[in-house]
């Protein structure tokens, strides 16, 4: 592994970190609303790119040229099934759903190797979306 | 030295000693067997190539020539003095799994001719001899008794297993009993060099041993047992070719073949999220009932092994401190510290990684996995005779160690199971060190210095060297004790099975002697 790719991967994760920090602050105290699951997810991810530099790696066989819309659709599709209120999710519901999706990925073998680390496909999609 | 402890170097050359049972090798197997016959009336001779203490000159007689896959150099895993390699073993005592004895269609040549139930009574006796408490390997029960917390996996693909430990030095433990037994004579510095057969080639008449003083000692017995280890046992059979050109017991060219070791290597690391308690039960030795040392490990379950059609897999866990050598290697040659912290935060909570700046994060909990993996039998992995000789003029063993494609496949699939099991349970993320594109190189994988399989047990002489009683096929009074008889090896360290099978052999020999008298 070269230093350059290390830095790149670090940047991906840093960007997710920053994105989610922003998200946490932004979502604090919000009441349930009529925003859809995809909307919530998009809202969440939209906070990321301002600090995201990014990811050069291909994850889980996902075509890196995939447009953000299809990546988001896949991520939403994976997580939605675990959401308790998919039609009117609160921010915390989305977070819980993604965690459950990650657990399911490991159960079902929807995993990929990134620099030797075994990560779930859901985690990888988040990383990819962070650079869009 | 005196009484029945005899320095063979002091005897006149060509001294002939007659006995009922001649045992070659005073390691775990040889001493166990001699002890079983102590004070029973039969005349027992125990041959040891070394003395009572380590001697480098004697040790160098056990040099090994390696021509295949690189093998750990030196002969330290075959100590040549009274007590053998138990003089510095780790005391790891664990039985083979019942499924290790069963046929596995996806692994060739791995079937035992005996069942687990045939060995079970002797495992229970071995527990007493090894002084490791009771025969209980129920990880959950032992952890509960000892108030230890096991990793709460959410599936049954990966499981916790437990081993018992006692670094019993067989030489010290049994020295007094054997030295004081009226029917046992121990010949030190007597290196068995060749077997001489009866004219009909179906029985051994004599073992010729050499000493460093250029003398020879001739041992004549009703029965002979080779208990010299997984390399020296086939070596002696192959070197005994004055009457049989291919060596004794080697009509089917199987002596020395199927050499196996446990594949040992640091395989990777895993990080745990905050809030997951340290896995002390895996990292450190704990005390079970009776004050017995126990330690827990990870293993791929027999069920998952069967489903994936892979060899058996076990991993030992150790804590990696960021200041130690391994972490230094990891951090400075493999990954950047930043990536490590980033992954640690990802593990902590995939969507809440930004609570702390990276440079303020405490070091994450890192565990290293060191694997002990079953090597499957490989016909071409073998011991032969080197043209080189040691200082006694005996041929050195030549090892051509080879692995098989399924060895690597099993490791990679097992890593996947461990990574998934940890991830699914929210217990961490696993990083494998294995390269998948290096063919069979398996860079970094070496042997655990467990020499096995070279005189394998089988029902038919076409499939192995010894029968289910550990007697050499076609030779009526020559037996083998030790891990060279294992046709397959599982992941269990071999000593407990060596002792159990030796106790079983002792029963068989007692029965034979009883019939003969």
Image: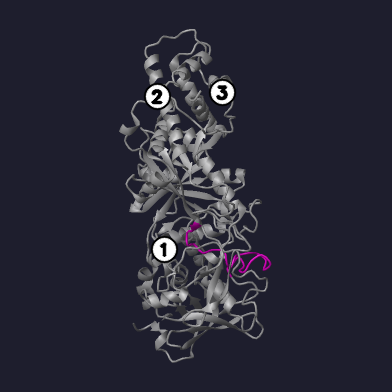
Query: Camera-side residue: B220 or B26?
Result: B26
Q: Is residue B268 above or below residue B231?
A: above
Q: CA distance from mark 3 to mark 1?
A: 63 Å
Q: Is residue B459 left or right of residue B430?
A: right
Determine whether the residue tagged by mark 3 lies in a helix, strand or loop.
helix
Q: Are marks 1 and 2 in contact (CB under 8 Å)?
A: no
Q: Is the stretch drawn in magenta largely helix, strand or loop? A: loop
* Badge 3 and badge 1 both on one subunit: no
Residue that numbered label 1 is attached to:
B129
Q: CA distance from mark 2 to mark 3?
A: 20 Å
Query: Camera-side residue: A90 or B498?
Result: A90
**Residue A132 placement (x, y as % from top left):** 51, 23
Q: Are marks 2 and 3 in contact (CB under 8 Å)?
A: no
**Residue A96 placement (x, y as % from top left):** 46, 22
Determine whether the residue tagged by mark 1 lies in a helix, strand or loop.
helix
| Front position among marks 3 and 1 | 3
Residue that numbered label 3 is attached to:
A71
Q: Is residue B514 visible?
A: no
Q: Is residue A125 above or below residue B136?
A: above
Query: Camera-side residue: A68 or B124?
Result: A68
Provide the residue span drawn in magenta: B446-470
Q: Are marks 3 and 1 in contact (CB under 8 Å)?
A: no
Q: Residues within 10 Å of mark 2 (few under 14, many from 20)?
A: many
**Quadrant, the C terminus of chain B:** bottom right
Residue that numbered label 2 is attached to:
A18
Determine whether the residue tagged by mark 2 lies in a helix, strand or loop.
helix
């Amino acid at each position: 592994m070269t230093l350059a790719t290390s830095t790149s991967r670090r940047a991906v994760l840093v960007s997710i970190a920053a994105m989610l920090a922003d998200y946490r602050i932004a979502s604090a105290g919000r009441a349930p609303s009529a925003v859809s699951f995809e909307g919530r997810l998009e809202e969440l991810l939209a906070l990321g790119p301002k600090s995201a530099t990014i990811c050069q790696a291909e994850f889980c066989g996902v075509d890196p040229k995939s447009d953000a819309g299809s990546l988001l659709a896949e991520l939403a599709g994976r997580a939605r099934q675990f959401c308790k209120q998919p039609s009117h999710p609160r921010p915390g519901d989305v977070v819980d759903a993604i965690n459950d999706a990650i657990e399911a990925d490991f159960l079902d073998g929807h995993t990929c190797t990134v620099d030797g680390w075994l990560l779930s496909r859901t985690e990888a999609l988040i990383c990819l979306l962070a650079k869009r | 030295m005196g009484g029945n402890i005899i320095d063979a170097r002091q005897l006149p050359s060509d001294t002939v000693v007659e006995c009922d049972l001649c045992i070659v090798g005073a390691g775990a197997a040889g001493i166990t067997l001699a002890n079983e016959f102590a004070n029973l009336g039969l005349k027992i001779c125990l041959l040891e190539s070394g003395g009572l203490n380590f001697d480098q000159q004697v040790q160098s007689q056990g040099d090994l020539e390696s021509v295949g896959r690189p093998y750990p150099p030196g002969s330290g895993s075959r100590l040549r003095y009274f007590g053998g390699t138990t003089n510095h073993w780790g005391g790891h005592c664990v039985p083979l799994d019942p499924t290790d004895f069963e046929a596995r269609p996806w692994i060739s040549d791995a079937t035992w001719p005996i069942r687990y139930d045939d060995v079970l009574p002797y495992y229970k006796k071995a527990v007493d001899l090894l002084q490791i408490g009771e025969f209980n390997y129920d990880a959950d029960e032992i952890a509960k008794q000892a108030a230890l917390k096991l990793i709460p996996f959410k599936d049954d693909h990966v499981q916790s297993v437990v081993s018992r430990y006692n670094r019993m030095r067989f030489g010290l433990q049994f020295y007094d009993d054997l030295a004081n037994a009226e029917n046992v004579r121990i010949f030190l510095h007597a290196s068995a060099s060749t077997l001489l057969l009866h004219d009909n080639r179906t029985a051994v008449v004599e073992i010729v041993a050499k000493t460093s003083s250029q003398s020879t000692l001739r041992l004549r017995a009703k029965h002979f047992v080779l208990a010299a280890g997984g390399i020296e046992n086939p070596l002696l059979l192959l070197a005994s070719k004055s009457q049989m050109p291919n060596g004794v017991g080697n009509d089917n060219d199987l002596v020395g073949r199927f050499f196996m070791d446990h594949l040992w290597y640091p395989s990777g690391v895993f990080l745990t999220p905050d809030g997951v308690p340290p896995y002390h039960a895996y990292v450190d030795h704990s005390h079970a009932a009776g004050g017995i040392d126990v330690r827990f490990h990870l293993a791929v379950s027999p069920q998952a092994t069967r489903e994936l059609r892979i060899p058996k897999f076990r991993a030992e866990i150790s804590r990696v401190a960021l200041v130690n050598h391994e972490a230094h290697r990891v951090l400075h040659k493999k990954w950047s510290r930043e990536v490590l912290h980033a992954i640690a935060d990802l593990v902590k909570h995939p969507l809440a990684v930004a609570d702390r700046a990276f440079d303020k994060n405490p070091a994450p909990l890192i565990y290293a996995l060191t694997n002990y993996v079953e090597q499957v039998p490989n016909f071409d992995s073998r011991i032969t005779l080197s043209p080189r000789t040691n200082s006694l003029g005996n041929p050195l063993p030549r090892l051509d160690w080879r692995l098989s494609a399924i060895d690597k496949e099993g490791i990679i699939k097992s890593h996947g199971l461990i990574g998934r099991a940890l991830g699914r349970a929210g217990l961490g993320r696993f990083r494998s060190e294995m390269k998948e594109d290096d063919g069979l190189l398996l860079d970094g994988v070496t042997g655990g210095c467990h020499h096995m399989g070279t005189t394998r047990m089988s029902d038919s002489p076409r499939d192995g060297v010894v029968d289910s009683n550990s007697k050499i096929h076609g030779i009526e009074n020559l037996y083998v004790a030790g891990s060279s008889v294992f046709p397959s090896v599982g992941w269990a360290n071999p000593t407990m099975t060596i002792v159990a099978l030796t106790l079983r052999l002792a029963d068989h020999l007692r029965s034979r002697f009883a019939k003969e008298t």
